[in-house]
Image: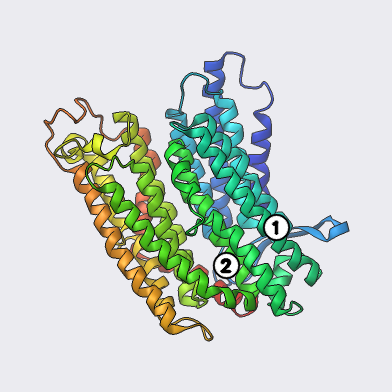
Amino acid sequence: MNAVLIALLVLPLLGAALTLAPVFGTDRATADRRALRFNTAVTGVVFLLTVALAAGFDHDEPARMQATTDLSWIPAIGVRLHLGVDGVSLPLIVLTSLLTLLCAGYSQKRLPGGEGVPSARSFVGLFLLLEVGMLATFAVLDLILFFLAFEIVLIPMYFLIARWGSGRKVPAANRFILYTLLGSAVMLLGFLLVGIKAGTFDMQALANAHGNGLSRTTQVTAGLAIMIGLAVKAPAWPLHSWLPDAHTAAPTVGSVLLAGVLLKMGTYGLVRVLLPIVPDGTATLAPYLGAFAAVGIVYGSLACLALARPGAKGDLKRLIAYSSVGHMGFVLLGIASLTPVGVNGALFANIAHGLITGLLFFVVGALKDRYGTADLDTLAGTTGAALYGRAPRLGALLAFAAVASLGLPGLAGFWGELLAMFGAFDPAAGLSRPAFVTYMVLAGLGTLLTAAYLLIVVRRVCMGDPGQPAAAADLPDLRRYEAVSWTPLAALTLLAGLWPAVLLGLSDPAVKHLLGGG
């Protein structure tokens, strides 16, 4: 199985390198078609390897690191090529490979084009490099390798936004990379402090030590630096301001991967690095993380309400971006509780958000393609966009994703938020219960506000008079390639909601292992 895990990383890397060679032909149209098919083929094989990894995973011991590779890489500073998966990382690897495959298939039919846009071969090279960085982030077990994988994704995503995006795409891409680079630089300082003081960068060895050999001052200092860097990527309020611009400008597949995977890299780092490696520092910082999480939940919901009201000229992609700030606030709140229940809820919400928000961005991207805009006022007109009457399948999918996002019981969005609030209701020993109960109440208020703005969006977009002039005269319903790309996300959203033990059975033993000292 370790060979399978290595192949997961090597295959898309080789695919990205192959796009630099003139192997797709000299005619641009032909080369573009071949490159896009090649992208789908590579991501498809990667997904099959991920399925094989999941099938070969020992589900009776999800807390044990499996499919491991541990080789010396840079002996001078003790950096090792250390790879492995457990019950925390495996679901994220599967989610990443699934979303990249669906985005590759979607791009084969709907690649953003226009004057000055580079060839599809360039898109495919960047796309596969992005997949390498995303998968490696969840597979590496060395702090320096984690930092490198964390950084690999920045350049491909920058160009996907800046070259294949729309609107104010270059300023949005610049803001994205500046924020995340600065956050990563601060995070690296924390990693170096831990590695120098502990004498190793190996994440498994550091987790087993569970803070032994690191003074409280070192843990708090390093924990603060690491938390800031990871909070930028999460994104946590008030370090979130790069996200709405990036989502609004990004192409559809860029938004799907940004929300579905890149945001999860920050919260995964909090669980994988902070909780087991600097536990005393994390306990000191947890109340502040919880406070920022609670504010972020309410802030994101209020921002969405403001964008959803008539006359606000709210962009649907921007609205979903702000909703991500609120949803990721639940993830951060669960982590801040430092309890198995809360952390399990955070990990479940991570996966649920990736599925649901990925589906939302796909649907909204399709609406933008059909109408030429994602402006809610333009779509809705005076009575509503009437998707139920004009494109019933498209309207049904939007409504399904919206009610899943607001946390309807029986769908994936429910369990993560519920468990995160349970964790806040009874936080770990040493944390202020009144403070965390207050955070839980604010989170509960956030769920009500979330329901309000999502139902407003459904009413304005799905309902209305099909005969109004503002609506498109000819609005195609769900296309075949769209159904192929979106149906797996809808099905998994339903499956995770009805059978949460699929994910919780994997994560619970691993979370208890990390909280108990690796």
Q: Which mark is residue 271?
A: 2
Camera-nearest residue between 382 and 370: 382
Q: In the visual, does 20 lie left or right of 119?
A: right
* Residue type, mark 2 in image: Val
Whole-percent x, y for residue 515 in the image: 58, 77
Q: Is residue 3 visible?
A: no
Q: Position of residue 58 (x, y in %)?
A: 58, 67
Q: Which residue is mark 1?
A: 188
Query: x, y (%) of residue 398?
Result: 28, 46
Q: Is residue 98 left or right of residue 446?
A: right
Looking at marks 1 and 2 on the same chain, the residue that comes earlier in the sequence is marked by: 1
Q: Nearer the viewer, residue 281 or 364?
A: 281
Looking at the image, which residue is at 24% across and 35% down?
379
Q: Is residue 317 above or below residue 472?
A: below
Q: Name the front one of labels 1 and 2.
A: 1
Q: Where residue 201 sits in the image (x, y, percent)?
A: 76, 64
